[in-house]
Amino acid sequence: MGLVVDLPGSSFSFNNPKQDDVFGAVLNMFVCVMHEFEIVFGLGFDPDPRKGVGGSPAQPESWDIGIVQNVIFERMNFVYDNGTTFTADFPNPVLDSVATLNPPFYDDPVIVPACKLDPMLPCTKYVSVSEPVLNVFYTSRGYGELLAPTSVDPTGVAVTNSPNSVNMLDEPSFGARKMLKNGAWITDAEHIIAFQTWLVAKTPSKVHLLAYVGPFSLVFWMSAQPSPDLLSIGAPPNQFGFYGTDGIVKKVNRSSSSSATIAMHSGAGGKGPVLVGPTANERGRNWLRTNNLLPS
């Protein structure tokens, strides 16, 4: 008996990026435009003693259930019109997390007033935009978010087996200088990020890997044609493309624009996730800083 993944209730989808321009509002910066993607893992409680994780603890246990993501490969290649090239390969997996309260999960829950999503709804009502992690009490009868008097439930927990899913939204937007300090302009850029993502349950004594997505890759390319009289606040004529695909990509295909169907599976997916250490964002910023590529 225990917590189980609900694969029919799980999904992976690519969405058009919210960032739709390589040269955006930030001065002296280009952005590697990539797909937004959403991952939903369905979950539930199964009383069958042959299924699930967690078993039958004597007392309620505090569990964290959510999404852990790793960047398992990353490649960047930026070329400027004076011939300067910046290239980096990162073949080692690292944690991909922006959480402040709930690392190593991808992010903290994002809850906003309903009126921010729909002006017809009251601002006193709050809506979950994304819930990458749940903090619940697990019992032999199921799980719930709140403790309850024993007169209500003998487990001492308000067992609801809800929420019945966790989800995350991600849209990488790594960027660098469009013009170097010596005046050189960006003419060519490629960026590949490969991910693997897991549904993880952290108990007081163990980490369970219930399901996974991946590996899958997001790919970006851009070519620009700056002119000698282009102002530093301007944007050169450019072409760019992006796509998402199954597996780990090592080479950009500039003729591709489609997005693959990405499968979700139960189990650990081979090697488990990196749960500690520097994040992919920290690693990327350090590379930009070392090469004087941080926009200014």
Image (cartoon, helix red, strand yellow):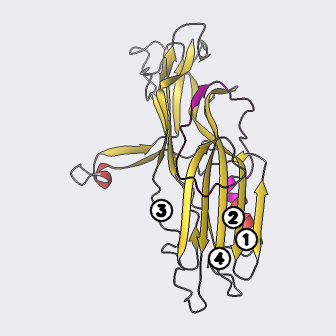
The numbered mark, 4 or 1, whose residue comes first in the sequence reads 4
Q: Kindly indicate whether the residue at mark 3 contacts the one at mark 4 (C-beta within 8 angstroms).
A: no
Residue 42 position, x and y percent, is 48, 28
| Residues in magenta, as a range | 253-282
Q: Can residue 284 be seen in this view?
A: yes
Dot in front, 3 or 2? 3
To which quarter of the image does residue 203 belong? top right
Q: Earlier in the sequence, mark 4 or mark 3?
A: 3
* Front label number (4 vs 3): 4
| Residue type at the position of mark 2 | Arg
Which numbered marker is on residue 156?
none
Q: Return the residue at label 2.
A: 285
Mark closer to the chain start, 2 or 4: 4
Quadrant in the picture for the N terminus: top right
- The numbered mark at residue 19 is 3
Callout 1 amino acid? Arg
- Contact check, label 3 and label 2, Cβ < 8 Å: no
Is 241 one of the magenta-colored residues? no
Numbered tag placed on residue 186 in the rendering: 4
Q: What element carries label 1?
A: helix
Q: What is the distance, in whole Å, between disc 3 and disc 1 at their CAs?
A: 23 Å
- Give the camera-side residue of 269 and 117: 269
Magenta run includes residue 274: yes
Task: Please state the horizontal and vertical placement of residue 134, each as a whole percent of the image.
Answer: 51, 35
Measured in 3D between alpha carbons, the distance from the residue under mark 4 to the one under mark 1, in whole angstroms, is 17 Å
Residue 162 placement (x, y as % from top left): 43, 26
Circles 3 and 1, Cβ within 8 Å, touching? The answer is: no
Check disc 4 and give the amino acid type: Ile
Q: Nearer the viewer, mark 2 or mark 4?
A: 4
For numbered disc 2, what is the local secondary structure?
Answer: helix
Q: Judge whether 273 appears above or below 293 on screen.
A: above
Task: Point out which mark residue 289 bears.
Answer: 1
